[in-house]
Image: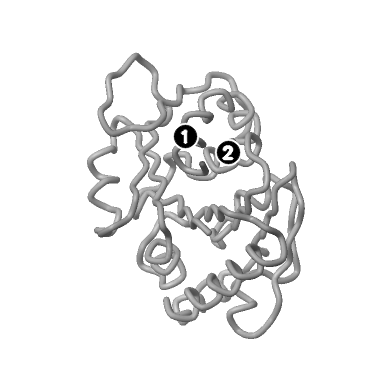
Amino acid sequence: MTIITVTSGNVGGVGKTTITLAMLLNSKGTAYLDLSPDNRSLSILLGLNPRTDIIDAIRGGKYTMYTRDKNLVIPIRHREYIELRQLYEVTPQEVQQALRALEKTLTSKYGVDNLVIDTMSTTNLGLIRAAIDTADKLLIPLTRERADLIRKSVPAQRGKHLVYAMNMVRETIKTNDVSAVIPYIEGASNQLEVAEKIRKYINDLIKVVLE
């Protein structure tokens, strides 16, 4: 299995969840894991609010899995502020073990070859660092204004395939190492609408990330 973690290091608001959602809308037979407990955007956009999730599974519980658009989705549940603080107690080793167990289930039971993980805008939690360290590929959304900052913010990774997507572009640009250029969408009222509108720009990205 190939694990793809979507990250922008410690920089937020660059479109990680929107791009992940657009990929979900354009792919089949792929698993998507929401690992953003601070706002659980992907889960909310898909209308999912499970009672248990992968973080609960780390402590011996179970996680909930759904089928959506011919993909598998493992959403994250709502957490109050106190519970969010407790996430700092979760170690990278615990998360890696849970991810490997999930990988085994997805491969053997469902025949899934790719797992895409949407993450929080931080590298300070063991939860997120483990998702980055476990990944085979990192999908890194960039914006023109903060591209250098995002690149520096993502922890150094040796031997990983780094895939960059330039997001929210308002003009024609030339790029060297960017796999997709996604335009700024005018007049959209929410992330789901944006994801629908950028679907055609995601195809090149999917070829690099999922195929």
Is residue 7 depicted above or below 187 in this figure? below
Which class describes the residues within 10 Å of circle 2: few (<14), some (14-19), or many (20+)? many
> Residue at label 1?
205
Q: Residue at x 66, y 59 (%)?
A: 75
Question: In the image, residue 93 lies at what x, y percent?
Answer: 43, 80
In contact (CB < 8 Å): disc 1 and disc 2: yes
Report the amino acid beneath label 1: Leu
Question: In the image, residue 38 lies at what x, y percent?
Answer: 54, 60
Quadrant in the picture for residue 9 = bottom left
Mark 2 secondary-structure assignment: helix
Question: In the image, residue 47 lies at what x, y percent?
Answer: 75, 48
Answer left or right for 86 relative to 78: left
Is residue 16 depicted above or below 54 in this figure? above
Answer left or right for 71 relative to 173: right
Mark 1 secondary-structure assignment: helix
**Which residue extends farthest top?**
172
Q: Residue at x 39, y 51 (%)?
A: 138
Instruction: Report, in whole angstroms, how far the alpha carbon at label 1 lies from the one at label 2.
Output: 8 Å
Which class describes the residues within 10 Å of circle 1: few (<14), some (14-19), or many (20+)? many
> Residue at label 2?
23
